[in-house]
Amino acid sequence: MKKLLTIMLSCLFALNMQAQDPVKKYGQLQVRGAQLCDQQGNPVILRGVSLGWHNLWPRFYNKKVVQTLKQDWNASVVRAAMGILIEDNYLENPDFAMQCMTPVIESAIKQNVYVIIDWHSHFLKTEEAKAFFGRMAKKYGKYPHIIYEIYNEPVEDSWADLKKYAYEVIGEIRKYDADNIVLVGCPHWDQDIHLVAESPLEGVQNVMYTVHFYAATHGDYLRERTEAAVKKGIPVFISESGATEASGDGKIDPVSEEKWIQMCERLGVSWVCWSISDKNESCSMLLPRATATGPWPDDVIKEYGKLVKGLLKKYNK
């Protein structure tokens, strides 16, 4: 009897660990129609958190933060936002950028959570992006944990120019990685998803299109635009979002945030919240006295951070 009980407990522990390890649970992700799916073709919703710019908040780019977000916040995906702008960015200091990105990526692989490698820019840098993502695909493409976000938030680029860019960068990635998910940004801060719906990329697989929202600014009009695109067959991934105003600061709107999350859940759209940082603004989740590694007690998690943590614990069960 004692032996049987031990076996049963061991089995329950193994099942529980698998449930807590998203990559073990879902495996190689794929896109079917408008839906992100696991390796068996079952619908999947990833829910998680983005780190802030690596060149502004490098202290949070460490292995233990990934562990904290997985184990304490219930995140199934972590986004590493590699800054291409502002001082000390990747283009100016690539070695420092990789010193930040590498432990996050490799910790995600070890922790069995998905990780978004985000080219965090507002302007096209085609050749530089191709070289970077080629290296990332060659190094990490064998791992099903990897998601490539090839352009964070286009501002002034046309959809025609973005399509050309996407074909080139995706082509470089596919030389080394045939199947991991690629996220493609759309015009006007990732809001003009209707332009994508009118003319999506052709001849590419496992590609999704990003929409970014900040709930206190972006209301029904962007939700309706997003839902219309999904219903037209466009695979959408919310790779960055917040309950604040579009500036990242100002009021927090939990009512609009809940409307967004409920829409995502209903449509099967994955969502990631911005950001793990300690800036003096509303969408920054931590106070400056928070440790670099976590876990973080409630007294160092700001109002919006508590909201995000609560949402992740509610939906990532």
Image (cartoon, rainbow, N blue to C red):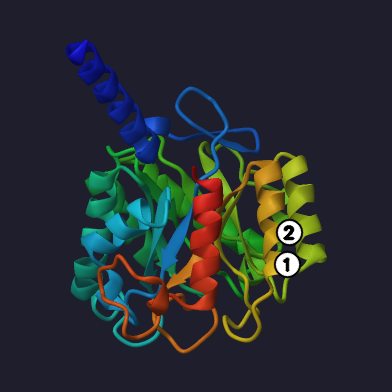
Residue 261: horizontal and vertical position, in percent? Answer: 66, 55
| Residue at the image position 55 percent from the left and 27 percent from the top | 42
Residue 267 % position (x, y): 70, 43
Write down the residue under mark 1. Answer: 255
Q: Residues within 10 Å of mark 1 (few under 14, many from 20)?
A: few
Q: Is residue 203 above or below residue 131?
A: above
Q: Position of residue 71 (x, y in %)?
A: 34, 52
At x 27%, y 46%, the residue is: 111
Q: Check the picture and name the quadrant holding the N terminus.
A: top left
Q: Quadrant of residue 99?
A: bottom left
- Element marked by disc 1: helix
Q: Is residue 48 left or right of residue 234?
A: left
Which residue is found at the position 34% from the left and 69% from the top?
296
Residue 135 can be seen, yes or no: no
Q: Amino acid at mark 1?
A: Val
As measured in the structure, the alpha-carbon distance from the residue carrying label 1 to the one carrying label 2 is 6 Å
Left or right of 63, for residue 186: right
Badges 1 and 2: C-beta atoms under 8 Å apart? yes
Residue 99 is marked as none
Count every numbered label the image shows and give the total: 2
Three-letter amino acid code of the residue under disc 2: Lys
- Assign a secondary structure to mark 2: helix
Does 244 appear above or below 235? below
Left or right: 286 as drawn, with respect to 283: left
Question: Which residue is the site of mark 2?
Answer: 259
Report x, y in % for residue 210. Answer: 58, 56
* Residue drawn where x is 54% and y is 73% of the image: 304
